[in-house]
């Protein structure tokens, strides 16, 4: 079966939903050797998966994942696909703490770095957060803090199987594409940043068959989050929307300096940036970018205006409430 599917891929054909699911199942059961796995990854680095392939791959991963139920919480996940090559600091992870600091719930899903210098898991591990896949522990964090973190490899066995291959390649892979879609608790709301317009549309078509409340953002200069360096395309259940840079710049006094959005050269440097921003000591550019992403996440959770949600996010950061979320989380 595996050879038939590989032959089909090698001659430029695409897989239907069942074939894609079977291929991912075979990967998870070690029925595909390392050389074949690298070949599959290479194929999907040369083209994006189709909607049928994405759907089949996701079905397999979700069926194999550890099951926990956090559906009682109206929570949001804020995530980017990565692989944009921009080496920004950990914007989406910081936005999660700001959202939680407003009193909302956040279920963040992420992993160690594969194509970037520092993933969200690298940051949190360095800070002393203990990864858990125990439902009781995660519910307690959401109840008492408002935020929990799901480290992908302890929920998805296939990510562990493929981790060495991904690390050796050092490139974005099909798992970067699938990662935002396989949060094991399937939270009710998701802000998803995408670095490519074609992929953004694939996600958009995918989510039209889901019940989730979602927003997909693509910065037209190639960033996989809102960086206030360009206009954005925005996809939601209401359809496609275009936000100009002028509309996004709620704080008209601040013009973002792209150089100030750069991350560090290693995890320790990125942790220093993370703590600096969360402590209210970030630059104006760093603050505004984190705040606008938190603002759009808040807009998924309530019916308030962008301006009002921006004010809530800003208060969360400036008052120290966002940093207090981290302190409380690490104490639990």
Image (cartoon, rainbow, N blue to C red):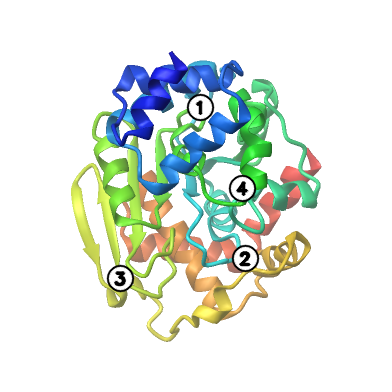
Q: Disc 1 or 3, which lies upstream in sequence? A: 1
Q: Which residue is mark 1?
A: 185
Which label lies toward us, 3 or 2? Answer: 3
Which residue bears the numbered disc 2? 319
Query: Label 1: few (<14), some or many (≥20) within 10 Å?
Result: some
The x and y percentages for residue 70 are 53, 25
| Residue occupying image coordinates x 21% and y 58% | 241
What is the distance, in whole Å, between disc 1 and disc 4 at their CAs? 29 Å
Is residue 69 at least partly visible in the picture? no
> Which residue is under mark 4?
169
Specify few, some or many for label 3: CA neighbours under 10 Å numbering under 14, 14-19, or 20 or more.
some
Whole-angstrom CA distance, mark 4 to mark 2, is 42 Å
Query: Could you say where residue 321 lies in the image, as x and y percent from the top left?
Result: 63, 57
Disc 2 residue crowd, few under 14, some 14–19, many 20+, Cα 10 Å: some
Between disc 4 and disc 2, whose residue precedes? Answer: 4
N-terminal-most mark, 2 or 1:
1
Q: Secondary structure at mark 4?
A: helix
């Amino acid at each position: 079966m595996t050879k038939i599917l590989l032959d089909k891929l090698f001659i430029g054909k695409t897989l239907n939903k069942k074939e894609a699911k079977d291929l991912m199942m075979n990967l998870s059961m070690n029925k595909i050797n390392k050389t074949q796995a690298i070949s599959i990854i290479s194929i999907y680095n040369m083209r994006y998966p189709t909607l049928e392939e994405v759907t089949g791959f996701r079905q397999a991963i979700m069926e194999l994942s550890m099951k926990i139920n956090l559906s009682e919480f109206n929570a949001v996940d804020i995530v980017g696909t990565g692989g944009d090559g921009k080496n920004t600091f950990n914007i989406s992870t910081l936005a999660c703490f700001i959202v939680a600091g407003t009193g909302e719930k956040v279920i963040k899903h992420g992993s160690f770095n594969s194509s970037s210098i520092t993933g969200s898991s690298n940051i949190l591990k360095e800070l002393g957060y203990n990864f858990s896949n125990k439902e009781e522990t995660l519910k307690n964090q959401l109840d008492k803090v408002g935020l929990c973190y799901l480290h992908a490899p302890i929920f998805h066995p296939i990510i562990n199987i493929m981790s060495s291959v991904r690390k050796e390649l050092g490139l974005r892979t099909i798992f970067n594409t699938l990662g935002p879609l396989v949060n094991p608790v399937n939270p009710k709301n998701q802000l998803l940043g995408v670095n490519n317009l074609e992929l953004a549309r694939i996600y958009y078509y995918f989510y039209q068959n889901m019940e989730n409340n979602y927003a997909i953002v693509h910065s037209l200069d190639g960033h996989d989050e809102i960086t206030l360096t360009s206009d954005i395309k925005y996809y939601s259940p209401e359809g496609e929307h275009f936000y100009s840079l002028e509309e996004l710049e709620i704080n008209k006094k601040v013009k973002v300096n792209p150089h100030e959005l750069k991350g560090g050269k290693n995890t320790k440097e990125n942790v220093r940036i993370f703590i600096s921003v969360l402590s209210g000591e970030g630059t104006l550019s760093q603050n505004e970018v984190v705040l606008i992403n938190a603002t759009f996440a808040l807009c998924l959770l309530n019916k308030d205006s962008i301006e009002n949600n921006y004010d809530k996010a800003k208060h969360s950061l400036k008052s120290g409430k966002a940093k207090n979320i981290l302190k409380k989380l690490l104490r639990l």
